[in-house]
Image (tube, helix red, strand yellow):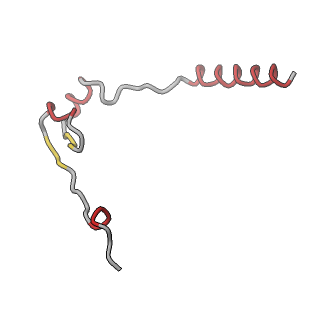
Amino acid sequence: MEQSPSKAFHRMPIISANIDDLATPGVLVEMVQNDADRLGAFRERALSFEDAFDATIELGVYVLRQRG
C-alpha cells in the first residue's frame, strides 16, 4: 500500500536567529531571554484570580435569570 506524498514527507522546521524572520511562516526564531522579554514574548495575559472568579459569578447570575 502506497502512502500519499503528503503523509510520506516530513518537513523539518527552519531555525533562524534573525528577529526579522518572526513574521515568516514556518520559521522558528531562537533568541536570548532579554530579546524575548523586550518583544513581549512572555508577557502575562492570563486573568487574575479575582477576574476569573467575578466572571463565574456573572455567568451564574445570567443562568439564574434565564431559568427564572
Frontmost residue, 30 versus 32: 30
- Residue 51 versus residue 18 in the image, above or below: above
Residue visible at 20% across and 39% down in the picture:
29
In percent of width and height, residue 56 lies at 68, 25
Asked where in the image residue 67 lies, by quadrant, the reply is top right
The quarter of the rendered structure image containing the N terminus is: bottom left
54 vs 37, left or right, is: right
Q: Residue furthest bottom?
A: 1
Q: Residue furthest left?
A: 18
Asked where in the image residue 2 lies, by quadrant, the reply is bottom left
Residue visible at 53% across and 23% down in the picture:
48
The quarter of the rendered structure image containing the C terminus is: top right
42 vs 24, left or right, is: right
Number of numbered discs present? 0
Frontmost residue, 43 versus 68: 68
Residue visible at 21% across and 34% down in the picture:
22
Q: Residue furthest right?
A: 68
In percent of width and height, residue 37 lies at 26, 26
- Residue 63 versus residue 25 in the image, above or below: above
In percent of width and height, residue 8 lies at 28, 67
